[in-house]
Image (cartoon, rainbow, N blue to C red):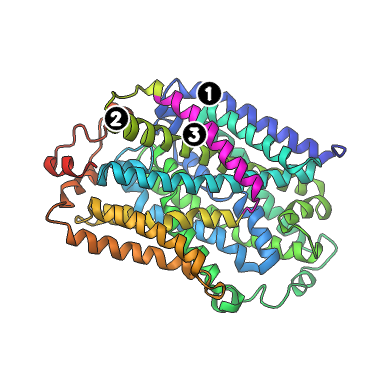
């Protein structure tokens, strides 16, 4: 192990602060599963907006984006914060207010209420896969920072990061995320801009014009958006996968659900979108700057930490490293909690225990205990994936490719189309996802990107066709009223969200499969 430098001391202090602050929030949970998962649906605007941008600006969209820009040009990485900002904007405009109003714990709760257990289970499994991938990318980003700064093996580095996040996720749940995000994300955004201004202002001793001139042809022009030879298809696929696919994001929606009222959820999404867009320029240009100062890197994922360590003043470099580490840990925390909630609430409590085994409901404290236990296997799975294939940035796009393909159509049409029904949702979920997997293997390299764009179109089309063809047996309007139904709190906690839902009672019974 290398000698610990000032950077190492800063990182260690930051880790300890995150651990202490996150763990202290244990007191706020008050033995309640609802408070662990959605903070008791009590969060104000500042916290909701902060938490949403903290989920958006993570290790994938910073360290990962810089690595992609280093290799392929500005647009290859800039699409990440652009896509995520678009997602939060659309969430504020269309989805957030509606979904907060009906009081849910997890996004698969909506699929259950609108379509039944089968859709809940399929969507839940897809989202679990998606978010294990997302958390893996953030563990990998954290590992790269700790490896570079502390001089320790990558495996040890990623384990340290994972254990810190695991501890405060189990302790405080969404409250831990809320309070650690406040200092983690604003440090990250501020350090991105400080680093960019340092180089753009010529304070590094090299003029910014010289830095820009060293970029290869196509790195800084618009060809990355319009020339397929320069990755335009892949870049647009990334924008779409994140801008639309991330709407079906467990962590984003968990924060929307935690807002104290629908207007707070909406404004919080707009706040998160604005702050995410605010990072496009500094993150994008840091990739170009790294290309100038660090040519020929064997591992592009070390570009940002190497730039911080060797080409910035200590204060800026240390802040940048802590910011990226904090952003990565924040999203890993949110992702692990969201997946654990789906496992405990949707899969174990409602589908396996209540529907398959015919057993009684869980209390709020039992839901709390099972959710906390579920965090451990989620962490292990993400840690293993992040160590085996450490590719932050790419993982982010892949994570939402999965749900973009099949899960977006049932959510969107379920909210806005009265004829949306259970058979259409199941076909859309299964066919969209399977088609995405098939196209991954058969799509020619020169057409890469179309394998992301085609499946959701097919998914929406099939949803409409199947819904229209099955209206007589499964009339969608019988469950459309759930979009305005707010279950009693005790029903939500017990997993019996529709216990007192009376509109279209016969259809409700028939579709709950």
Residue 35 x, y percent position in the rendering? 43, 28
Q: Quadrant of the N terminus?
A: top right
Name the chief secondary structure element in magenta. helix
Write down the residue under mark 2. 354
How far is disc 3 from disc 2 in space, using C-alphas?
26 Å
The crowd level at tag 3 (other Cα within 10 Å; few <14, some 14-19, many 20+) is many
Residue 20 x, y percent position in the rendering? 64, 27
Determine the image quadrant of residue 419: bottom left
In the displayed structure, does residue 457 sit left or right of residue 237? left
Above or below residue 310? Residue 24 is above
Q: Residue at x 27, y 53 (%)?
A: 414
Residue 355 x, y percent position in the rendering? 28, 33
> Given this view, does label 3 or label 2 mark the residue nearer the observer?
2
- Return the residue nearer the eye: 370 or 213: 370
Q: Residue at x 33, y 52 (%)?
A: 411
In the displayed structure, does residue 440 sit left or right of residue 265? right
Q: Which residues are magenta?
A: 367-392
**Residue 378 colored in magenta in the image:** yes
Sequence-wise, which precedes: disc 1 or disc 3? Answer: 1
What element does badge 1 sit on? helix
Q: Residue at x 54, y 48 (%)?
A: 133
How far is disc 1 from disc 2 in space, using C-alphas?
29 Å
Sequence-wise, which precedes: disc 1 or disc 2? Answer: 1
**Residue 451 colored in magenta in the image:** no
Write down the residue under mark 1. 26
Q: How many marks?
A: 3
What element does badge 3 sit on? helix
Write down the residue under mark 3. 174
């Amino acid at each position: 192990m290398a000698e610990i430098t000032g950077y190492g001391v800063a990182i260690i202090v930051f880790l300890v602060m995150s651990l202490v602050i996150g763990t202290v929030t244990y007191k706020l949970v008050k033995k309640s599963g609802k408070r662990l998962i959605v903070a008791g649906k009590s969060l104000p605007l500042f916290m909701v907006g902060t938490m949403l941008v903290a989920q958006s600006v993570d290790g994938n969209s910073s360290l990962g984006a810089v690595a992609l820009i280093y290799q392929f040009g500005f647009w290859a990485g800039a699409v990440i914060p652009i896509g995520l900002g678009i997602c939060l904007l659309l969430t504020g405009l269309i989805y957030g207010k509606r979904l907060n109003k009906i009081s849910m714990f997890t996004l698969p709760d909506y699929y259950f209420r609108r379509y039944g257990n089968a859709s809940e289970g399929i969507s839940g499994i897809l989202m679990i896969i998606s978010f294990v991938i997302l958390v893996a990318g953030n563990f990998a980003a954290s590992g790269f920072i700790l490896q570079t700064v502390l001089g320790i093996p990558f495996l040890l580095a990623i384990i340290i990061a994972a254990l810190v996040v695991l501890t405060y996720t189990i302790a405080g749940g969404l409250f831990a995320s809320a309070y650690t995000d406040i200092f983690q994300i604003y440090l990250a955004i501020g350090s991105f801009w400080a680093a960019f201004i340092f180089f753009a202002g010529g304070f590094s001793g090299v003029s910014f014009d010289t830095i820009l001139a060293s970029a290869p042809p196509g790195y800084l022009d618009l060809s990355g958006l319009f020339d397929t030879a320069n990755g335009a298809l892949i870049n647009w696929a990334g924008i779409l996968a994140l801008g639309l696919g991330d709407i079906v994001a467990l962590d984003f929606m968990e924060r929307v659900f935690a807002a104290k009222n629908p207007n707070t959820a909406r404004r919080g999404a707009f706040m998160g979108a604005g702050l995410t867009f605010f990072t496009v320029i500094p993150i994008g240009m840091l990739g170009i700057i790294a290309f100038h100062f660090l040519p020929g890197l064997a591992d592009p994922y070390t570009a940002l930490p190497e730039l911080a360590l060797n080409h910035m003043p200590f204060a800026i470099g240390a802040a940048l490293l802590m910011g990226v580490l904090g952003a990565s840990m924040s999203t890993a925390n949110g992702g692990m909690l969201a997946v654990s909630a789906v496992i405990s609430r949707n899969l174990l409590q409602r589908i396996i225990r209540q529907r398959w085994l015919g057993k009684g409901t869980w209390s709020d404290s039992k839901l709390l205990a099972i959710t906390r236990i579920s965090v451990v296997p989620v962490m292990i799975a993400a840690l293993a994936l992040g160590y085996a294939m450490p590719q932050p940035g790419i993982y982010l796009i892949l994570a939402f490719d999965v749900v973009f393909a099949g899960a977006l159509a049932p959510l969107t049409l379920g909210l806005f189309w009265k004829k949306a029904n259970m058979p259409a949702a199941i076909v859309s979920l299964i066919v969209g996802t399977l088609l995405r997997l098939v196209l991954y293997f058969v799509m020619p390299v020169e057409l890469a990107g179309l394998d992301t764009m085609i499946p959701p179109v097919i998914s929406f089309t099939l949803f409409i066709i199947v819904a229209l063809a099955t209206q007589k047996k499964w009339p969608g309007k019988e469950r459309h009223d759930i979009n305005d139904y707010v279950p009693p709190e005790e029903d939500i906690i017990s997993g019996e969200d529709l216990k007192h839902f009376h509109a279209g009672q016969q259809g409700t019974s028939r579709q709950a499969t």
